[in-house]
Structure formats: structure tokens, C-alpha cells
Image (cartoon, rainbow, N blue to C red):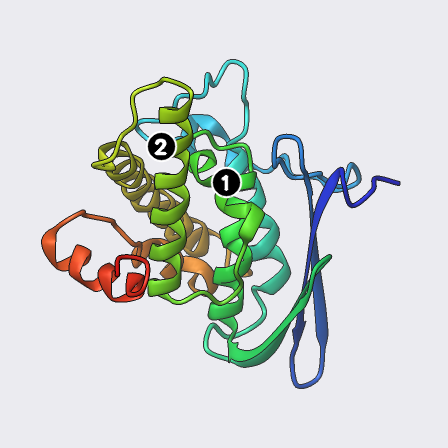
């Protein structure tokens, strides 16, 4: 059995009125990849690269028959399609360090879960956000997400500078990352709608808002002023 030093563990428990569903996620600490259940069949037609791949996907379809991101999203769709997106549910998230509990619409809890699955799935575009998984914060607000993204990115640039490499203090590459993610979100949103139209048993709406309402980071004066509010004390 892998140890805590080898594995990151997140257990999402969804407590509905008459039912409880658990969705455990295990990640290899070494590369933050998902440890898949070998018994789980994820070779589904919907996830075929030839029909699902994003226009800027760097994966070779000759090597990767299935889109890894689609396969992991399908796990969520399959598990929760019988529920309403706005159904109130108590979500309990357990990690090695602590436990989080919140009453939220189902799509809010799934949004937090998908925040793990997408970067860890094996998708090289979303994989650029893998460092965020070390400090995964369930139910994070937009402000909290922005602070974590900017802080971790700028810390990574500081470490580059210390090693004699050229840092990206203007965060131009971070903007590029989120522009790529915006293209990905648009494609995934389209694919979820197609699946819902084709399979009456799949309710794509439970996760669709994650892709239709994506966050884009544009570094401008207004955003700098908003972030500066959280930095009071450090600059005095």
C-alpha cells in the first residue's frame, strides 16, 4: 500500500438527502498523476482523440487513442448524472492534513473535484496547473484562486532567478497558459453538450458550467489594485 509520502489523497463525499456518494482520488506525489483503478473501464467512444481532441492538443493521436481529460470527466458524469445540478448537497472533503465541509449546490462540489481531475488527468495543457494540487483548496473563491495562482507562479519565477535563469516577472507565460485553457474549455463544453444530446442518461449540465464560465487572467492595473489589497503589511 502506498504511503502518505508517495501519494496525495482526496476523498470527496457527497451527502444527498437519501444517498451518499464517495469519490476518492489518489495522486502520485512524484508527478501528480491520477492513480487509476485498473478495474475501471475508461475506453469510451466519447473520449476518442479523433473526435474529442482540442485544436491545439499536443498529444499524438497515434500514441494516445483516448483523451485523458475526457476519460476522467466521464467518471464524474457517469457517477452523478441522476442528480440535479442545483440540488443542495453537503460535501465533505478529507485529505491527509484536514477535513473541509460545505453545503453547496451539487455543481459547486463537483467544480472543486474537477479542479483536481483536470490538471492530474494527463492532459498537457491542464497539466501546467499541477503545482496547484499540492495546496488544493476545496470551494475556493475567485480571490483565493487568483492569490494562489499568482503567488505560486511568482515564487516559481523567483526560484528560476536564483538558479540563474530568466524570470517572467510580468507573468506573460501565465497569461498564455490561461489563454490555452480558454480554448480547451470551449472545446470541452461543446463535447459535453454533444454527449448530453446523444445519451439521455448523461446530464452534462452538472459540470458544464465549469467550462462555460471559465476564468481568464489578464494582468492589468485594475487587477493589480485588487490584489494589492491582500498584500497590505508586506509592503509597509
Of the two numbered discs 2 and 1 on the same chain, state the one appearing first in sequence.
1
Query: Residue 95 at what x, y percent from top left?
Result: 69, 59
- Picture quarter containing residue 228? bottom left
What residue would you read off at disc 2? 157
Of 187 and 105, nearer the camera is: 105
| Residue 91 seen in the current view | yes
- Position of the C terminus, as image quadrant, is bottom left
Q: Is residue 32 left or right of residue 49?
A: right
- Picture quarter containing residue 90? bottom right
Query: Residue 182 at what x, y percent from top left?
Result: 28, 43
Residue at image position (80%, 40%) is 39
**Residue placed furthest toward the bottom:** 17
Around disc 1, counting alpha carbons within 10 Å, would you say few (fewer than 14), some (14 to 19), or many (20 or more)? some
What residue would you read off at disc 1? 131
- Position of the N terminus, as image quadrant, is top right
Of 31 and 62, nearer the camera is: 31
Around disc 2, counting alpha carbons within 10 Å, would you say few (fewer than 14), some (14 to 19), or many (20 or more)? some
Per the image, label 2 sits on a secondary structure element best described as helix
Of 219 and 34, nearer the camera is: 219
Q: Is residue 51 above or below residue 152?
A: above
Query: Residue 21 at what x, y percent from top left?
Result: 70, 68
Residue at image position (64%, 60%) is 79
Q: Nearer the viewer, mark 2 or mark 1?
A: 2
Of 56 and 162, nearer the camera is: 162
**Residue placed furthest toward the right:** 1
Per the image, label 1 sits on a secondary structure element best described as helix
Amino acid at each position: 500500500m502506498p504511503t502518505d509520502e508517495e501519494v496525495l489523497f482526496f476523498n470527496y463525499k457527497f451527502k444527498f438527502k437519501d444517498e451518499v456518494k464517495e469519490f476518492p482520488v489518489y495522486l502520485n506525489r512524484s508527478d501528480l498523476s491520477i492513480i487509476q483503478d485498473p478495474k475501471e473501464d475508461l475506453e469510451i467512444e466519447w473520449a476518442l482523440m479523433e473526435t474529442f481532441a482540442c485544436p491545439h492538443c499536443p498529444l499524438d493521436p497515434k500514441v494516445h487513442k483516448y483523451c485523458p481529460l475526457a476519460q476522467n470527466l466521464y467518471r464524474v458524469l457517469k457517477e452523478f448524472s441522476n442528480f440535479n445540478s442545483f440540488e443542495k448537497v453537503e460535501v465533505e472533503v478529507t485529505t491527509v492534513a484536514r477535513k473541509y465541509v460545505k453545503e453547496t449546490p451539487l455543481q459547486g462540489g463537483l467544480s472543486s473535484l474537477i479542479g483536481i481531475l483536470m490538471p492530474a488527468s494527463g492532459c498537457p495543457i491542464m497539466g501546467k496547473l499541477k503545482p496547484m494540487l499540492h495546496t488544493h483548496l476545496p470551494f475556493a473563491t475567485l480571490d483565493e484562486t487568483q492569490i494562489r495562482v499568482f503567488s505560486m507562479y511568482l515564487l516559481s519565477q523567483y526560484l528560476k532567478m536564483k538558479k540563474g535563469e530568466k524570470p517572467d516577472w510580468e507573468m506573460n507565460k501565465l497569461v498564455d497558459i490561461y489563454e490555452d485553457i480558454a480554448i480547451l474549455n470551449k472545446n470541452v463544453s461543446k463535447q459535453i453538450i454533444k454527449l448530453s444530446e446523444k445519451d439521455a442518461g448523461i446530464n452534462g449540465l452538472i459540470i458544464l458550467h465549469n467550462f462555460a464560465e471559465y476564468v481568464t487572467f489578464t494582468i492589468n492595473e485594475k487587477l493589480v489594485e485588487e490584489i494589492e489589497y491582500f498584500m497590505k503589511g508586506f509592503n509597509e
